[in-house]
Amino acid sequence: MNNRSISNNYSDKNVLNDADDPSEISLVRLEHAETTDGMNITLRFSERLFPHNIGNVQNYILNPFQTVNSAWLDKGDPTIVHLVTSLNYGVSYGISVNGLSSITGEGMDEEHNSAPVVRSTISSIQLKKAHTSDSKLVTLVFNEVLQSTEANNKDNYVFQPGATVISAELDTNNLTLVHLTTSLDPDTSYAVRAQNLVSASGQDTMDPQLSSRVVIRSHAPLIQSVQLNSAYTSDNKLVTLAFSETLRSAEANNKDNYVFQPGATVISAELDTTNLTRVHLTTSLDPNTSYAVRAQNLVSASGQDTMDPQLDSRVVLRHIDEQIQTDR
């Protein structure tokens, strides 16, 4: 089965219209399923999920069948669930989810509980989290370092239901964060959508499927951790690692902070000066062996965030082929 046929089976009943009011959605919908390495799958739902039963791997069914080894709720965004599995290269998958419920007690929408698993590389801007502790300052967390011109344009952020964005400011200490000044009704649930943003490299724009997030309210400060998003090589000599946060160079350039399994010598490690979420490792991989790589002891550019031990490893992708690019 190819991706097009899976998309036809699932897309009509799984796309959440941007105009939908989050406060009117009751049943839980599966909105998006994505993998960058065939091992880790990220699921995005329409509602904040109740933690109970998230870890029951029998709630997640892959088609064609593959075992789901573990599942957990994202620490920063309770609309996100992370799965660990092992997908066969070149095979298109769909996934169905049952047994989950929202924090208000509503169950899964049986007509919107399936989605194709999209294979992608991290080559577009994604809105990872939206958070506020006082309904006045909303912090947005992106997966890429942003250009200030677009990031500081308040018209590039839209709340649903409507709320006025008074100002938008790119965090000068962490260029993956944008702070919005607004005034939200404390009794209303909101989602926010980002548009027209451009990465610092000038090459990446917003991923339309991952441009919106439910605004999470919490009295606790925003908790972040450094996550390894993807690892890939085109020649078995230079391995590029993509992280969720901008990194501090001292730790990022330490070759001892990267471990391959099975073993492979890391000759050097270099933080990309044009994109501080990327590290380039010089090594020598056996072309006939599959590898995973683990990052350790890394620290974000702000000095506040360290590696997430649950998301510090990735399978090394050998190349980016037409199949993966088509899936985006």
Image (spheres, rainbow, N blue to C red):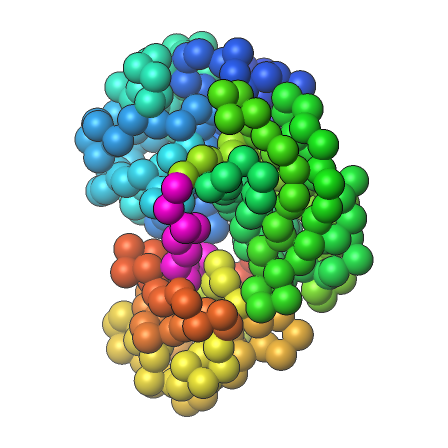
Counting every numbered tag in the picture gives: 0
- Dominant SS type (magenta): loop
* Residue depicted at x 36% and y 67%: 306
Give the image location of residue 8, x and y in percent. 58, 20
Whether 228 is among the magenta residues is yes
Q: Residue at x 46, y 36 (%)?
A: 216
For residue 31, above or below residue 91: above
Q: Is residue 165 above or below residue 40?
A: above
Q: Is residue 145 magenta?
A: no
For this rendering, which residue is in front, 119 or 49? Answer: 49
In which quadrant is the C terminus drawn?
Answer: top right
Residue 90: x percent and y percent?
47, 45
Give whichever of 322, 130 is nearer the camera: 130
Q: Quadrant of residue 71?
A: top left
Reply above or below: 151 against 313: above
Does residue 5 appear anywhere in the picture? no
What residue span does the magenta drawing correspond to? Answer: 219-230
At x 74%, y 60%, the residue is 148
Visible in this render: residue 310? Answer: yes
Query: Where's residue 41, x and y in %?
Result: 39, 42
Is residue 275 toward the left or the right of residue 228 in the image? right
* 65 lies above or below 124: above
Residue closest to the far bottom: 267
Q: Position of residue 79 (x, y in %)?
A: 42, 32
Identify the residue at image location x=57%, y=25%. 185
